[in-house]
Every structure is written in C-alpha cells, then in structure tokens.
Image (spheres, grey):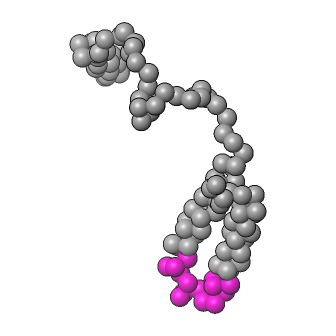
Amino acid sequence: MSSNFLPVLALLAVVLGAVGSLYGLRRLVEVSRDPLATAPFGSGLLPSEHALSRFHVRWYTLCMLFLAFDMEMVFMYPWTRVVAAVGPSSVIEMFVFLAVLLAGVSYAHREGALAWA
C-alpha cells in the first residue's frame, strides 16, 4: 500500500522544497521593510483628495459613451467579415444596432458628457 503513495509523497516533497526555496530566495533579495518617508509621486503634486474618493456623476455618462463606442467596434469587426455572405439583412441589422448606440450617445450628450468646460 505504501508503494502506491510513493510518487505522491515524492511530488509533495518536491513542491514543498520548491516553495521553501522560493521563500528563502525572497528573504535574500527583499528590500528594506521600512516604509518610505515621502508621499506617492503624482506628477510632483501632493494628493488633493483621498484615494477612495467618489467620482462625480458626470463620469458615469462619459463611461457610458465609451462603452457605446467600444461595443460598436466589438460587433462591427465580425460583421465586416460576414456582410457579403449574409446579404442586405445584415446591413439593416447593423443600422438598427447603430441607431441604439446613437440613442445612448445622444443621451450622454444631453446629460453633458461631451461638454468639457
């Protein structure tokens, strides 16, 4: 019975040895554990707000605008490969899809996502 578990025990010994050697290697090459005495670098400016601060609601409409253009490209690349084989129905479907995306972009424009001032 013990001869059946010999390969498993050998593999376990190799894995434990590899993990132990990686921990030892980390101890040899680690940098000092003392924290840095300087602030994080952000273009030379001190942080003006907390790192976990909330975003203004305007950024959500801008994100929706980005997703609209991103989804357009995700679906248009494969569409260009099959448009000749499928025929006019694929062109109509793509224009319907673009109309839905245009509705999202017009909503984002109405909410002021494109106004940078």
Per the rendered image, the range of residues in magenta is 78-92
Res. 36 image quadrant: top left
What quarter of the picture does the N terminus occupy?
top left
User: What percent of the width, then of the height, locates residue 39?
Assistant: 44, 21
Q: How many numbered marks appear?
A: 0
Residue at 55 percent across and 65 percent down: it is 74
| Residue 68 screen position, x and y as percent | 64, 63
Q: Residue furthest top?
A: 34
Which residue occupies 71% across, 63% down? 109
Depth check, front residue: 109 or 3: 109
Residue at the image position 67 percent from the left and 80 percent from the top: 95
Residue 44 point in image, percent of width and height: 41, 32
Give the residue drawn at x 57%, y 62%.
70
Give the vertical position of 80 relative to 22 (above or below): below
**For this rendering, which residue is in front, 95 or 43?**
43
> For the stretch drawn in magenta, what is the main secondary structure?
helix
Most distant residue in the front direction = 117
Image quarter (top left, top right, bottom left or bottom right) of the C terminus: bottom right
Image x and y of residue 92, in percent: 68, 84
Q: Answer yes or no: is residue 10 visible.
A: no
User: In the rendered image, is residue 114 in sight?
Assistant: yes
**Residue 68 relative to residue 81: left or right:** right
